[in-house]
Image: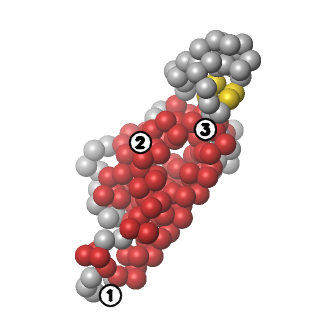
Amino acid sequence: MELGGAEVIMKVMTKVGVGDDILNPALWTVRNLVHNNMGNKGIVGGLGGVESLIKVIGKTFQGKKFPLVESALTTLVNLVVDHEKNCRRLLKEGLEVLIEVAEAYENVPEEDLSGGGGKETYVEGIKNNAALATSLLQMVGPYNFLVCSNCGMKQASGGNCASCGRAISFAVDMT
């Protein structure tokens, strides 16, 4: 069953300058909207949901807003799990950001660890987000293949299709 409202909540989530107190509930709304609902995953993915979430993750990660990063990563997990097109969208648009978040736990700058009692919370936030990003990278791994636009054959690499011999086109139909 597809539920309505995806367009409205996506506008809220992607609005530039929206406050954290509005963004976080919007992220959780999208997360709940797509949870175990293939129809809604397709709708939100088609509305640019994967790309929007990657932007949110990148921006909030750079701003060290780790609870928002976690909300966006969790939403992204629900959006891509068991959904090939959304996984391929994530491969196309989000690898750089996910790798940055996944590697952050091993590369915490020393200046970020100095000072106050928030150090443990800070490191725990980085650790949780790195684990979520690593899980996402593992989820999309099986979808890292080329598809021949002529015959539909999936293959890991190459310039020509192993089945029909035509040149592989890198244009991916995301509709």
Residue 129: which numbered mark, if any?
Answer: none
- Amino acid beneath label 2: Ser
Q: Which mark is residue 52?
A: 2
Q: Which one is closest to the eye, mark 2 or mark 1?
A: 1
How far from the left and from the top, in percent, is residue 171? 52, 21
| Residue lying at 25% horizontally and 85% vertically, measured from the top left | 115
Residue at the spot 67% in from the left edge and 42% down from the top edge: 142
Disc 2 from disc 1: Cα separation: 33 Å
Given residues 59 and 41, the one toward you in this image is: 59
Looking at the rendered structure, the kind of residue marked 3 is Asn
Q: Is residue 15 left or right of residue 83?
A: left
Task: Give SS at disc 1.
Answer: loop
Q: Secondary structure at mark 2?
A: helix
Q: Residue at x 47, y 60 (%)?
A: 102
Number of other residues with Cα within 10 Å of mark 2, as a class: few under 14, some 14 to 19, many 20 or more: many
Residue 128 visible? The answer is yes
**Quick check: 99 left or right of 156?**
left
Find disc 3 in the rendering and name its residue.
144
> In the visual, does 120 lie left or right of 110?
right
Per the model, the C-alpha gap separating discs 3 and 2 is: 21 Å
Q: Residues within 10 Å of mark 3 (few under 14, many from 20)?
A: some
Q: Marks 3/1: CA distance?
A: 42 Å
Residue at numbered disc 1 = 117
